[in-house]
Image (tube, grey):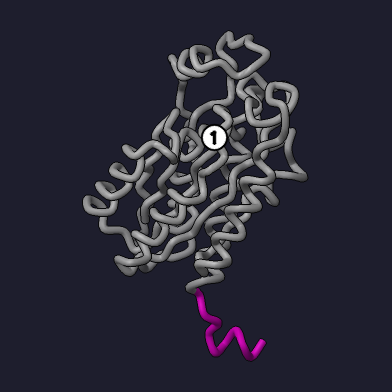
Amino acid sequence: MLAFGDSITFGADSLCNGLTSLRWMPGEWLRSWEGLAAVAAPYPSVLERMMKERYTAQLPTVFNAGLAGETVTDPATRQRFTRALNERNPEIVLLQEGINDLHGGITRIVSPLRAMSLEARGRGIQVFLGTLLPERPNGCRAFAVPPRNDADFIRPANDEIRSMAAAERIDLVDLYAVFESHLNEYIGQDGLHPTDAGYSAIAKAFFDAIRAKFERPTASSMRR
């Protein structure tokens, strides 16, 4: 299984590390990744543990292909995705990316998400596409929502992701809906990255989607 995305897949911590800018600035954004630390349990590792506990007769693995600071509209991202497919040859891809593009005012993230999803599916790989997470206003990295941005760019971007997934029949995992009612619990100090509870929530959302897609009730469970 391949988990592909940016720092939220990588598993960055949610500390501000001295960031102070009130608005998004390219220099500040670049500086914000200096010294960024990883949490002990990013969502791919939590998901792998959940899978191993559930499917004890198998040896499920989840490779973490998260890259902090990456934008989905960068052509290098598609190249990295293709390399990861070639190297890992996964049966399942978990794809969640695009928030960094919105920080710079770029909203056309659906096309590369579609292209990567269809590339994987064309190889016979099952794709689960995650929506973007919400951000906590006033967080030091919450550049896609007011007051650090002029408007909430996340909601309309997710609407486009949902529409595209429905049109292409791509399995959607609505992480935004999972986080929306637990914002202060699941998103940390910087307003962007999940807390430990948030990373666990992402893992559970993908885990539930995988179970719903692949598990079939046994004869004994149907008789209960």
Residue at the farthest left position: 87
Q: Is residue 142 left or right of residue 85?
A: right
In the rendered view, tell whether residue 217 sits above or below residue 97.
Answer: below
Q: Position of residue 136 (x, y in %)?
A: 71, 30
Q: Is residue 140 left or right of residue 78?
A: right
Q: Residue at x 59, y 50 (%)?
A: 131
Q: Quadrant of residue 139?
A: top right
Q: Residue at x 58, y 57 (%)?
A: 173
Secondary structure type for disc 1: loop
Relative depth, front residue between 60 and 29? 29
In the rendered view, tell whether residue 157 sits above or below residue 218.
Answer: above
Q: Residue at x 65, y 52 (%)?
A: 159
Q: Position of residue 160 (x, y in %)?
A: 61, 53
Q: Residue at x 63, y 23 (%)?
A: 190
Q: Which residues are magenta?
A: 215-224
In the rendered view, tell whether residue 119 sits above or below residue 216.
Answer: above
Q: Quadrant of residue 193?
A: top right
Query: Is residue 100 part of the magenta span, yes or no?
Result: no
In the rendered view, tell whether residue 65 sits above or below residue 173.
Answer: above
Q: Which residue is mark 1?
A: 106
| Image quadrant where one finds the N terminus | bottom left
Check disc 1 and give the amino acid type. Ile
Majority SS type along the magenta span: loop
In this rendering, the count of numbered labels is: 1
| Image quadrant where one finds the C terminus | bottom right
Q: Is residue 181 left or right of residue 87?
A: right
Badge 1, how many Cα within 10 Å: few under 14, some, many 20+?
some
Relative depth, front residue between 74 and 46? 74
Q: Quadrant of residue 198?
A: top right
Q: Position of residue 76 (x, y in %)?
A: 32, 37
